[in-house]
Image (cartoon, rainbow, N blue to C red):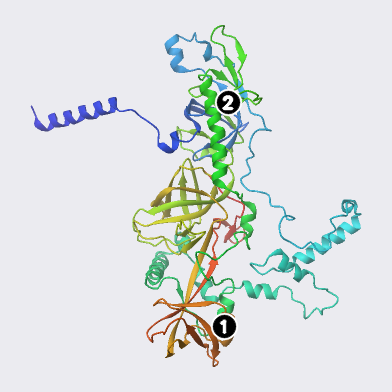
Amino acid sequence: IDPQNHAKRVLADFLVRGLCTMSASPSNWVSNLPRSYVLSESHQYDSETKELHITGYVRGVAPFDVNSLVHVPNLGTFACKSLRKAKNPAMRERKNGLDEDDDDTGVVVADPLKRENLERFATPDALDGEQNLIGFDEADEEFEELDADKATTGAEDTDKTSSFARPTGWSDYQAAWLDAVDDDAVDADDFDHGELAKELNKKSSASVATNGMDLDDANEVSEEERRALIEQRRKQQEEHQEFPDEVQVNEDEKARERFARYRSLKSFKKSYWDPKENLPDSYASIFHFSSFKSTQRAVMAEMRDLVKAAEACNGQFWDGVKKDDSGGQDATMEDISDGEEEDFLEGCVPTGSYITITLEAVEPQEYKSLAAGSLLCAVALLPHENKVSVLHMGLSNCDDSEVPIKSKDVLTFRCGWRTWTGCPVFSQNNLNCDKHKFERFLPQSGSFFAASVFGPVTYTPCPVLVFREINGTKELVASGSMIGADADRIIVKRIILTGYPVRVHKRFASVKYMFYDPEDVKWFKPAGLTTKHGLNGKIEESVGEHGTMKCLFNAPIKQHDTVCLCLYKRIYPKFVEERKSGKDEGTVRTIRQRNSLVVK
């Protein structure tokens, strides 16, 4: 006997024996959630009606609801038109086609009134919120009966008002004062036509040069330029690790203008920050939850009631109608509890049924993107899971990548059954504080952090995989789980302005090289100071004309200490910018899709 062949045969026997004795079970995040899905035995697409027919067994704990939205991985989310009872091939072979349950008479049609809308984004109401409606009388109910001339005049006034630029960060109430200026009382040459807003919103040339080209454009540049970008990114990460959050003000810059959007906090943990203050325009089109945990508990409780109702019928129902075992006749299902009129199982199909799902509005180009003979899976979405909000994920770095990953880089997220691309914001996950510190780069391997990104609402528990695309290949960079959806989670970016004491006398010190303009010293005078040796202080007055300031501390300061001024600004995630080829001269234009999120 050949010893090598004998050893291989023994190992093969062990493998076959292990496969035969092991029991297959789904993942915990699939079995713990009351979600039903269908793994396709076969599928067929009708290009004329744009309908996709998927045939298979209903799997999962909960019954399949025809009024729920259905997501097909790598294809998209669609509305279910109907559920049809299909002929079970296993039952036909065993009973020679004589089973009564294998007919095609059972059809459950969706109710458009009960079905959730396919719109992922909210429609913001321009009249909802803090604003000063100039010239609008709430008691006047005849404003809809204006004649055509008045309507035309009002449209012209609206166009004139909207022509003025609004400074970024200004609320509607603040911007209303710009609109309230009388055109007749001000000379046309002295009137501000948005110059102030453009000046306040203008970024410095240094920041524009730094952010003008990023690694997202690496596939469109030459190899030498790509290496230069990677080397620049590495130097930025090394500098950030050596001097975290420290920012230097140049001599020709005015700190009060460069850091106009920043504020000082007396205590990072205890100071109040309004989560609804100066939200960006992108937050108007997403959904906000007053309490995501309460919403999830309500949805899960409703699904558990549905599962209990299905278990009470022993799975012997179809579209809310229970089959009578004694006579074989169909009878209306009994109420689940006394006085309850609503039938939980209306429009539902029990688990284990062999059905055909009909999905409508499936575009031909989307179906052609699938590989031939691919295996499809139709997953029923829970309520609100098709809406877009700000998702937060607890992640850990898989491995130290050669190219550092920066916040707001384009990454691909695989969250449960769905996949999409987004520009996440990395932050620390503080459990005892309502504010979370912003991280400029993806933390090193082994550390835990949080990532916030725009995406479809997903209930926990749910695993998350994060990929980055480099030269057409996807690389796994992080993994973790879902925390929840909360648009009010405050992510704060911190910057530190540093100065050095040049003259020290007990608790007083003259600090230089933090500012270079006396007006900057007066602007930041209310902010508190700290030192790297643990002292606290404040700005007393400006000295001279070169930005030197006199400071007072709570203890005698040493000559070799460093004075720090911490400023904070809230950071928001953003949508992915789509690059489209222009028709003229073959140029490439970057268009921001504010209300666009492709979920596969």
| Disc 1 target residue | 520
In this view, 560 is above or below 483: below
Towards the viewer: 376 or 130: 130
Question: Looking at numbered disc 2 in the image, what kind of residue is underneath it?
Answer: Cys
The residue mark sitting in front, 1 or 2, is: 1
Q: Residue at x 59, y 45 (%)?
A: 387
Mark 1 / mark 2, whichever is N-terminal: 2
Determine which quarter of the picture holds residue 499.
bottom left
Q: Are marks 1 and 2 in contact (CB under 8 Å)?
A: no
Is 418 situated left or right of 3 in this image? right
Residue 385 visible? The answer is no
* Dot 1 crowding, Cα within 10 Å, few <14, some 14–19, many 20+: some
| Disc 2 target residue | 348
Q: Position of residue 4 (x, y in %)?
A: 12, 33
Q: Position of residue 404 (x, y in %)?
A: 39, 62
Q: Position of residue 80 (x, y in %)?
A: 60, 31
In this view, 425 is above or below 483: below
Residues under labels 1 and 2: Cα distance?
67 Å
